[in-house]
Image (spheres, rainbow, N blue to C red):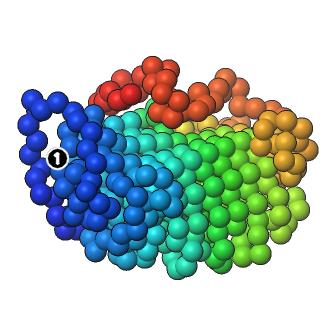
Amino acid sequence: MSRIRTPILIAIPFLSLVVSTAASAADITASSCTQSDVQAAINAATDGSTVSIPVGNCTWSSPVGWSDKNIHVKGAGIDRTVIARPGDFAFYIGAPVKAQFRLSDMTLTGDTNQAAIAITSETSPGITSGWRVDHIKFDYPTGQRRGVTIRGATYGVIDHNQFIWSGGVAVGLAAFNASDTCSSSNPEGNFINSQPLDLGSANAVFIEDNSFTSSGTGGNIVYDDSAGGGRAVFRYNTVTGGFFYSHWTRGCEIGGMLHEIYNNTFIGNADYNDYPIRLEAGTGVIFNNTVKSYQSFPPYVVLDERRPVGAGETQMPLTVCDGTRAWDGNLNDPAAPGWPCLGQIGRSPGKSVAAMMAGDKPVSAPIYLWNNGTESTCASGGACTDVLAVWASPPAYVKSTPHPNGDVDYVMNGKTSKPGYTPFIYPHPLVSGSVSAAPDPPTNVRVVAIQQ
């Protein structure tokens, strides 16, 4: 699951990228669902426009795309507007400045190794936010496929979609930023890692009210924070035959930093039933999840740190966590040299790597797990035997008992919830329309207004 960061170069036939700022927003209906007609309608759209794709079945030989337009592109409905794309990207959307777009109401199918939808803001110097991808059927029942790929520091909502796939990643996030470089003092994800923890805020990618159904084998991933300190809220989803995954800190990449996973139903099937959640970096909360039909009892969450000596991670420049790296915690735990490792389970973000190298280490922020079990009522916050277990590795680095300084890496002791934690408003304001309920973003990032 390693990833090499390289620019994605694609040819999108934009007819015009210059739109008069004096023109008023007008809704536009594409002449047909063909690639050329849809692209022409998008090119003519201005901020605030809705571009409608009519009923039809069309095959696109190249992507449709736009950059920095706050528009709504919508089909006539799932299985009414059907776009087949036998190649990478049906939609490629740039959002380095303006990110208040919406894409909805269609079926996407075909063959892609990259993604059906790509959202990118990786050239941005800050954080953009406000996009929504909803009511789309991703119909990719064979091969290794990707649904939505998000590249860069950008937040939005992926909701009420159907993901049908046999392998690969349904939602992938690489949250690196233009200011990041491949160095030990400023790796990919350093910008996001320097932001406050912000548990329970709008500052994350929200994945809510989706269904993920997989018939493939060998690890079908509903979410993969593959690099760059990404932040995700995964809630009110139904997952059949898959798992939530986040990569470790490695090479030039800080792993996923924030995971809020709650009120979901995870169901194992004949093709995949190992475990529902695997985290290899970061912190967060895991609660009110129903987990059933997995092969082990009790079902378990994997919390795994990969950089200690012997754990397998040796990629430069971050390399192994052995007590000699300035970017690690190095808090004199003789059983775990280097602990806590950069970006590992149970540590808070909010520090740049350069600051950590200078001695300003991140504080303890254990992952909390509670009210997870096999009953259907667990996912609604109701009656729950809370039988979910944790498989932690290496046990000296990731544990619920105190390290020599008193810190723990995770807490799971019955019904104990994370003190002071309140989930962000549900449904998300971009879904309900109550955008005024969204909190302000951190003061050290660029504020981008959310379009209603």
Image point (40%, 68%), residue name: 57
Asked whether 15 or 214 is in front, the reply is: 15
Residue 105, image x, y percentages: 46, 51
- Circle 1 — which element? helix
Asked whether 241 or 275 is in front, the reply is: 241
Image point (88%, 62%), residue name: 297
Residue 392, image x, y percentages: 73, 58
Q: Quadrant of the C terminus?
A: top left
Residue 235 sits in quarter:
top right
Tell whether 258 sits left or right of 293: left
Residue 353 sits in quarter:
top left
Compared with 125, 441 (above or below) is above
Residue, disc 1: 44
Identity, as a three-letter code, of the amino acid under mark 1: Ala
Tell whether 280 sits left or right of 30: right
Image point (42%, 22%), residue name: 440
Residue 365 sits in quarter:
top right
Residue 13 visible in rendering: yes
Q: Residue furthest top?
A: 436
Residue 228, image x, y percentages: 41, 53
Compared with 248, 49 (above or below) is above
Residue 2, image x, y percentages: 46, 70
Tell whether 9 sits left or right of 269: left
Image point (38%, 49%), residue name: 74
Compared with 113, 96 (above or below) is above
For label 1, the crowd category at 10 Å Cα-Cα, with few meaning under 14, some 14 to 19 and many 20 or more, is some
Residue 149 visible in rendering: no
